[in-house]
Amino acid sequence: MPFRSLEETLADGTAAPRAMGEPDWAALRDRAYNLRWATVVRGVIPLTAADPDLPIASEIGAEIARYVATPHLSYGPAAGLPDFARAVATHFAHMKGASVDAARVTATNSAASALMLVARHVVMAGDEVVVQDPVDFLVGESVRRAGGSVRRWLPDADGPNAGRFTVAGLKAAVTDATRAIAVCHPHNPMGTLLSPDEVREIARFAAARRITVISDEVWSDVVLDGRPFESFAAHAGSREGLHAWVVYGLSKGYGLAGLRIGAVIAPDAAAAAAFRSAQGFDLTIEGAATISQVAATAALERAGAWREAFLLHAASQRDRAAARLSRLRGVRIARLPEATFVLFIDIRGTGFDEETIAQRLEVLAGVKVVPGSPRWFGSGAAGHMRLSLATTEGVLDEALSRIECAWEHVLAA
Ligand SMILES: Cc1ncc(COP(=O)(O)O)c(C=O)c1O
């Protein structure tokens, strides 16, 4: 294929946002696993796992260095460091419309782990949980691992309700066995965002039916175009009667995936304490690394400028990718993501399935994407592919040029 070599692009500089600086590509090849640079054949561009290529905020690195300069890395408190819990609570109050008591917060070893623990805590064997389809595999996996059964909410992947729950749909979906509704808010892979009104309506519905809401809000720091975000944590507790468990993490909004840092926000302080006791935090079986909490606290308190630049960059990457990909034969992009830095594109018009197109793109274009197969997103994702766009402008442009250049060969192969 007549595309430019990746080495040439990287050597020329790749138009990283000025506020973030150029990625260290050699370090990414060494460190970025989970389908990314360290795992692909040299020369292939991985637009795969949702983990930014961009360097983290300098404030975070400085805080890690400052902390380890004092050579003691002792056990932290079972709930996590008080500074971390306060930083999360303040962040939710300022950015997510939820006034959260820090006593509701438990530091966890990643959002993925938080999701598993919450499901294990809330879901009993045989309970039914309504889960969106498509949605990131971790949501359904958490229910299955807890012994629950997944009741799939499967609107048309391109219809107006794709990636969002509606009260009308939920009324039809819940049964007497429904213990919980699991929401991905904002939604991976669709990039949809429930409005504050929709959040309130769903919260009211669940409270009235005594159904627990498990809300995975790991993407809530990547809300684009200045849209408002409201957390389900705003509606939990005795006043509104909603049992809502919120899962949060800093992998997406601050690029801290390798630190494995997240949090659970329980409905109230007593529920948080019971959760920690039942799930092994009090016995040091569970818990988050103190160094990761220190880094996350610095991110939440001091990396605001980095995050602003990151959000502008994510919106601009979305626009350039959507404009170019939607011109390809057989590709449709029903609507632009309102949140996240992933783009979920409909390739049903090509006549090929998602695994075939993804494999051919890797071989013929040198670009690796995530196929919309059941193992990643559920059966509702069939005929789609997900591309992660959190790289530099130059690398994304090169990936798009390669896809454009190879597309007719991909369809002809
Ligand atoms: C919806 C959703 N939940 C959880 C996670 C996992 O986040 P973490 O890296 O904090 O485990 C991801 C990562 O892609 C995700 O998309």
Image (cartoon, helix red, strand yellow):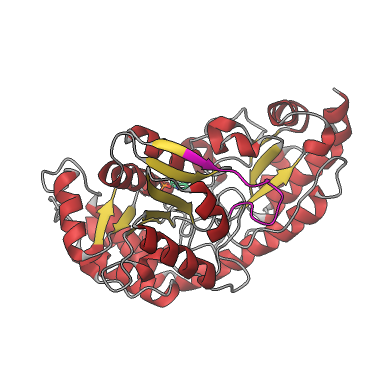
Q: Residue 365, position in %: x, y?
A: 77, 33
Q: Nearer the viewer, residue 155 or 391?
A: 155
**Can residue 3 be spotted in the picture?**
no
Relative to 312, is 286 above or below? above
Relative to 254, residue 325 above or below: above
Where is residue 151? Give x, y as percent: 48, 40
Compared across the picture, whether 402 is left or right of 283 comes to right
Apparent side of residue 6 relative to residue 270 in the rendered image (left or right)? right
Main secondary structure type of the part rendered in magenta: loop
Quick one: 362 or 61, which is closer to the camera? 362
Quadrant holding the N terminus: top right
Instruction: Give how far across and how far down residue 71 sits, in percent.
Output: 16, 53
Q: Is residue 106 above or below residue 233?
A: above
The answer to which image quadrant residue 235 occupies is: bottom left
The stretch in magenta equals: 151-163
Q: Quadrant of residue 140?
A: top left
Residue 361 within the segment the image draws in magenta: no
